[in-house]
Image (cartoon, grey):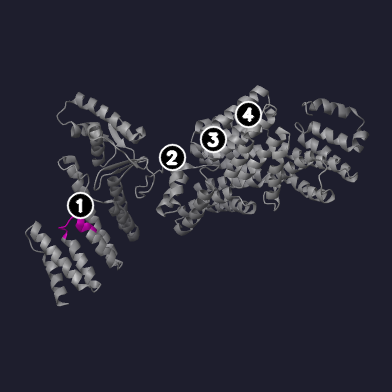
């Protein structure tokens, strides 16, 4: 067996009289061992017979190793985890009869076998954590490097499954060197490569994951050991799809399909699980549903809880997107029951994210925020930056919701940066979204790159910055290049303008450090809103969203959007550009929009009886336009309603003096009437 001459041993044993093998536990055991890698189901029959023979003879060593053989045969078959249940129970009985292991090697093998059995079939078992600790301690002491590596790989898998990637990484780090020792069998080393690839994509180190997979497949070709090719390719799919490389993910899936053993139920389930993810990312909802349904069916048949939960979460997502909420909720509930039983923080995290998504789509904001708060708190504590079946658009939307509500802000911002999340609709209203580039134009001009002010020399960067300002002032996408060139070089000829614009555009891209932020297509230029936040554009868009809400009778929504927009207005647009006509036109338009919107907001606040807020917003408006007489009137009325007569009269005096000093006029009849009412008390 040590020399891998399994077939030879099987032939020798089968040449013996069958009645001799029937009565001899060791002959039965070795016949099972000879068949184990190639005929696991047949080998289990021999291990089971040997187990009962040894038990009758009270042979401790034989009983324990036959038990190990039976459990290993179920692992090799990788088909029906339910077969583990009687063997898990049987070991408890054997340990009562033989509470002390006869040999250290036997103790290690039994411990590793029991831990693996519990992990795959009964991860909720009350003693699984103690078996995990015993397995780790024995792995550190065992002199068999191959046995050690297999045990450590199972331990790492377990810690990933229960949502503790940090602990998994610590375990793998402790044994990484021994995994690379020359005496480590290729089979064990390839097993370890699978674990390393899982670790990489869990931490969103997708390039490293794909490199590890490539190295593992190359080693398999060199050694002729292909047992782990399927799982290596599966990790390739995880790595590729986690970084959005649909084409590469498809290539790995094709490779999986060619080497997949249809008798291994869990392998087939995993193939369909990954195929459903790939199909959904491609926009093939029907294909995703077909693969997802098969993945769940086979996972349930296998009786292995963690894959059942993963496949159920995926199918729930697909059903939800297809508009089948009851079925989707049923899948989510199944996954959450498993998460609760096995105390898996990763499954809980994924389940709460999915619950939040479902709730938000049903416009159940309170429930959605409650689930999202729990999910993000778990993510922060455990350091999650990736999950199986990662859907970037779903996560981007949930991150927008989290930042809107102030949920785990630093963790969420870091997650957005690390995963380069870009929502379908730019979240203009979320100023704390970690935009690659943030540009301030209302009040004073400022440019931030990756959250830090961008230093620039006025001499060397003046033209590129002017190009940026003109592009922003246009207030729209697809600005014709001729329009930009005319604004910057009005005296130059056509060819000279074009050349100057190209050079300036190149310098601006270098300054920003994000080439994708400036898009040029068919002679038109756009500042890509997926990467750049501009306060003036955000101000415009929020107020544009408020208008239909107001028309539809959604007064509070309109007021909230208006208030968010007005908060962005911290002064006139590009106030330093006093002579440029393109700046003046935009400045006046935005200023007018600001004042008109303040009046709308104040009216809403008056209806709601929020006089203090009315006074505050009127003051904000008067700081921008001191001649806005209507705002003085609103302040006077609010102070009057609050019984603060002296302050109302003070506002009148301020209004009268300002109008006289600036325009040489007296207040309007409406203001004077209000003043007289105040004097009468």
**3 or 1: tag closer to the N-terminus:** 3
Left or right: 201 with respect to 463? right
How many tags in the picture? 4
The single residue placed furthest to the left in the displayed view is 664
Q: Residues within 10 Å of mark 4 (few under 14, many from 20)?
A: few
Taking the spot 68% from the left edge, 46% from the top edge, the residue there is 132
Query: Which label belongs to residue 239?
Result: 3
Secondary structure type for disc 1: helix
Structural distance between the alpha carbons of marks 4 and 1: 66 Å
Which residue appears at 8% of the width and 57% of the height? 663
Label 4 vs label 3, nearer the camera? 3
Magenta highlight range: 620-628
How many other residues sit within 10 Å of disc 2, few (<14), some (14-19) or many (≥20)? some
Q: Earlier in the sequence, mark 4 or mark 1?
A: 4
Residue 379 appears in the picture as rendered: yes
Query: Which disc is residue 258 wearing?
Result: 4
84 versus 559 height, above or below: above
Instruction: Compute the Cα span from label 4 to label 3.
Output: 20 Å
The residue under label 2 is 420
């Amino acid at each position: 067996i040590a020399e891998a001459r399994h077939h030879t041993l099987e032939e020798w044993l089968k040449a013996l009289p069958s009645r001799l093998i029937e009565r001899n536990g060791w002959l039965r055991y070795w016949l099972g061992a000879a068949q184990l890698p190639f005929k696991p189901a047949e080998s289990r029959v021999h291990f089971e017979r040997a187990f009962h023979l040894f038990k009758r003879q009270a042979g401790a060593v034989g009983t324990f190793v036959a038990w190990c053989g039976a459990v290993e045969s179920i692992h090799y078959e990788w088909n029906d985890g339910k077969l583990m249940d009687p063997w898990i129970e049987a070991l408890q009985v054997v340990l009562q009869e033989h509470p002390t292991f006869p040999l250290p090697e036997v103790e290690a093998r039994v411990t590793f076998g029991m831990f693996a059995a519990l992990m795959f079939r009964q991860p909720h078992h009350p003693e699984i954590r103690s078996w995990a600790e015993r397995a780790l301690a024995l792995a550190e002491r065992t002199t068999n490097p191959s046995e050690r590596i297999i045990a450590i790989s199972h331990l790492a898998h377990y810690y990933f499954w229960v949502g503790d990637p940090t602990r998994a990484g610590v375990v793998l780090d402790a044994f990484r060197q021994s995994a690379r020792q020359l005496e480590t069998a290729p089979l064990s080393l390839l097993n370890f490569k699978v674990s390393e690839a899982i670790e990489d994509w869990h931490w969103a180190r997708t390039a490293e994951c794909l490199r590890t997979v490539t190295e593992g497949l190359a080693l398999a070709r060199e050694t002729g050991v292909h047992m782990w090719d399927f799982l290596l390719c599966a990790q390739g799919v995880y790595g590729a799809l986690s970084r959005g490389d649909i084409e590469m993910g498809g290539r790995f899936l094709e490779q999986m399909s060619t080497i997949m053993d249809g008798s291994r139920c869990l392998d087939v389930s995993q193939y369909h699980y990954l195929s459903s993810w790939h199909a959904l990312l491609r926009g093939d909802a029907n294909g995703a549903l077909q693969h997802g349904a098969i993945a769940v069916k086979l996972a349930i048949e296998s009786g292995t809880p963690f894959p059942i939960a993963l496949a159920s979460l995926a199918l729930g997502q697909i059903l939800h997107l297809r508009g089948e909420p009851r079925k989707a909720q049923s899948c989510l509930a199944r996954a959450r029951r498993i998460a609760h039983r096995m105390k898996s923080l990763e499954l809980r995290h994924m389940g709460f994210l999915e619950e939040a998504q479902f709730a938000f789509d049903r416009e159940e904001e309170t429930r959605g925020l409650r689930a999202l708060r729990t999910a993000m708190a778990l993510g922060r504590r455990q350091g999650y930056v990736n999950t199986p079946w990662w859907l970037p658009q779903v996560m981007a939307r949930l991150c927008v919701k989290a930042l809107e509500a102030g949920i785990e802000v630093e963790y969420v911002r870091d997650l957005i940066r690390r995963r380069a999340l870009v929502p379908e609709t730019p979240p203009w209203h979320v100023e704390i979204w970690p935009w690659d580039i943030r540009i301030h134009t209302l009040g004073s001009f400022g440019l931030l790159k990756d959250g830090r002010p961008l230093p620039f020399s006025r001499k060397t960067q003046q033209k590129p910055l002017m190009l940026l300002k003109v592009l922003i002032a246009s207030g729209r996408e697809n600005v014709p290049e001729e329009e930009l060139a005319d604004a910057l070089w009005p005296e130059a000829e056509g060819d000279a303008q074009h050349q100057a614009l190209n050079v300036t555009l190149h310098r601006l891209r270098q300054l920003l450090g994000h080439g994708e932020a400036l898009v040029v297509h068919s002679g038109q230029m756009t500042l890509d809103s997926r990467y750049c936040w501009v306060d003036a554009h955000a101000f415009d868009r929020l107020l544009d969203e408020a208008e239909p809400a107001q028309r539809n009778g959604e007064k509070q929504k309109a007021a909230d959007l208006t208030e968010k927009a007005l908060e962005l207005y911290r002064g006139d647009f590009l106030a330093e550009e006093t002579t440029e006509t393109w700046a003046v036109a935009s400045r006046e338009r935005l200023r007018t929009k600001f004042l008109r919107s303040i009046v709308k907001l104040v009216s809403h606040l008056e209806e709601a009886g929020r006089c203090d807020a009315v006074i505050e917003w009127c003051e904000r408006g008067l700081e921008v336009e001191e001649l806005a007489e209507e705002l003085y009137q609103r302040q006077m009325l609010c102070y009057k309603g609050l019984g603060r007569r002296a302050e109302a009269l003070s506002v009148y005096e301020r209004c009268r003096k300002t109008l006289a000093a600036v325009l040489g006029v007296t207040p309007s009849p409406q203001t004077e009437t209000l003043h007289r009412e105040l004097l009468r008390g």
